Amino acid sequence: MKRHFKRFALSIILSISLLAQAEDRNTNIADIVVEAPRDGSSLDYILTTETAVGSGDYTAYYLTANRHGILSTEANTAYLRAAMKYGYRRGRWSFDACLDAQVQANAYNKYFIQQAYADLTWSWITVGIGSREFSPVLRDIRLSSGSTIWSGNSRPIPAVYLYTPTFVTIPGTNGWLQFYMEASYGKLLDDDYKRDRYAIYRVGKSGQAESFLTTDVWYHQKKLHLRTNPDKPIVFYVGFDHAAYFGGESYNSDFGGENQSFSPRLKDFFKVILISGGNENSPTGDQVFFYGSHLGDECFRLDYQWGGQDMKQKRLGIFFENIFEDGSSIAKFNGWDGLWGMEFHNKRQDAWLQGIVVEYLQTTNMSGPIHWDRDDYAQEFGKEFGEGRAQGADDYYNNFFYAGHCYYGLGLGTPMVKSPAYNADGYLRFTDNRILAWHIGIEGSLLKAGLSRFSRASRLSRASRDSSPATLGYRVLASYRRSWGTSYVPTSSIRDAFCTMIELNASYRPWTAKVAYGMDHGDLLGNNQSFNFSISYHGKIL
């Protein structure tokens, strides 16, 4: 198990050290994408309001999933959002800053800063600090069910980060190999939320509740993705995502009710990169295994594209993500677990079918129900300790010390695995991480080419000098999932959920609007239905 982790960490470090040249520059930020002049500055603002009303205990699933936590999961909610983004370009240098605030109704946080960051870019590399919305690299976040490690499902985590704004060509490969990378250290700021949820869970329980609370937690994440020449008909992608939690203060019945504090030292920040063992300043489990809680995925995708010269018009792809919690999953001892999918995209703006994604997600194997590896205890008890080996019970997204792979109760990975925010009793861990799920997403345009040309010729406002024509589109999402609980706490009967959403969206710069209906049915998320409406205005100051 340690051998697999070290190979993975070494591959990340070697790849980040490559010299490269820039290809182009497009940010991953959702909703706020502003391009400054090549040598100059820009200052833009976006005002948005959105509401969701209906019946049930929660807002319909697809209205909140993979949206960076901007709409509350609580039923009958609304928000006002104001964002301002500044950009400056000079030669190979650029600077970007954003302030994005929200006021919410019927949500845990009534008002909060969604994004506040500053980025400095030189050529192909960017260093930044703050809270910024990052979306999955290889997933179509509008149509996909999400990525297994990072889906943009929760609010952004405040961090110091280093990343490439886009794929970068590796010198000496003649354009045949490119890479994308991210690396960050962040701090979870949801301690008050977790304390309040833990207090709800403890109501009516005597002694130490069968749960625990861990606060003051640090977070580390890194990504490396490689792809072949994107201008060729066939493009292959391979990548790794890795996330880790470390440090923290825990209130845990396993420690006899005593508070345990493990403030990280400088060398501990390097331990989570190299995925090495803990020491006396680590929880007991981390001293036996690895410092911190680690999880990740291995990503593969193969695309065939056709229908254009400089710009490929159509693309058909197949992809797979293998989720891992330790070395057994990295070595694919977890059977068919992972995200399997196929997608089609058409870049024509007036195409009635612009994209379709079909996915199958399985997390039921977890490398078997039992974890035992005598090598994990060799340093403490000697090589001859114990017999046999069974590296299983991966328990995806859960950990013995940390509340789980989530932030403000929303899973950072695929939202198909029910987030702790849906636990009405306040339980802070994932209760349904053994699932089978099917998902489909479809979108397209409802405007004909002639109408698009008419709308371009009939711009009336100064702000509509933007080159984008008027658009009218649709989006449909649907899924069905079945849950068996967890490996350690299986359910007595199968829980399921059928979820769907139908959306109409329109854009006539500087205005965009959306109306949608979402519905959930089943005992996993409950029976919910929500009517949703949003409108936003994008203005320019500079």
Image (tube, rainbow, N blue to C red):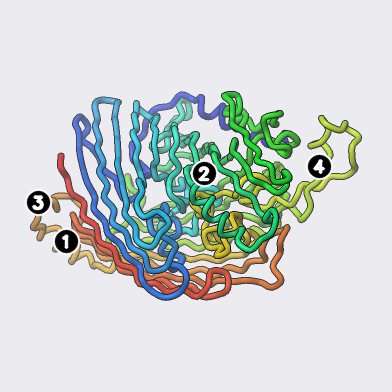
Q: Which residue is mark 3?
A: 462
Label whose residue precedes the other's in the sequence (2 or 1): 2
Q: Is residue 538 above or below residue 275?
A: below
Label whose residue precedes the other's in the sequence (2 or 3): 2
Position of the N terminus, as image quadrant, is top right
Mark 1 is surrounded, within 10 Å at the Cα level, by few (under 14), some (14 to 19) or many (20 or more) other residues, namely few
Q: Are marks 2 and 1 in contact (CB under 8 Å)?
A: no
Mark 4 is surrounded, within 10 Å at the Cα level, by few (under 14), some (14 to 19) or many (20 or more) other residues, namely some
Q: Is residue 401 above or below residue 60?
A: above
Indicate the secondary structure of the residue bearing disc 3: helix
Q: Which residue is mark 4?
A: 373
Q: Which residue is mark 1?
A: 453
Spatial separation of the CA atoms under disc 1 and disc 4: 66 Å
Q: Which mark is residue 100?
A: none
Q: Is residue 417 visible?
A: no
Q: Is residue 75 above or below residue 183?
A: below
Q: Are marks 2 and 4 in contact (CB under 8 Å)?
A: no
Q: Nearer the viewer, residue 457 or 508?
A: 508
Label whose residue precedes the other's in the sequence (4 or 3): 4
Indicate the secondary structure of the residue bearing disc 4: strand
Amino acid under label 2?
A: Tyr
Amino acid under label 4?
A: Asp
Amino acid under label 3?
A: Arg
Label whose residue precedes the other's in the sequence (1 or 3): 1
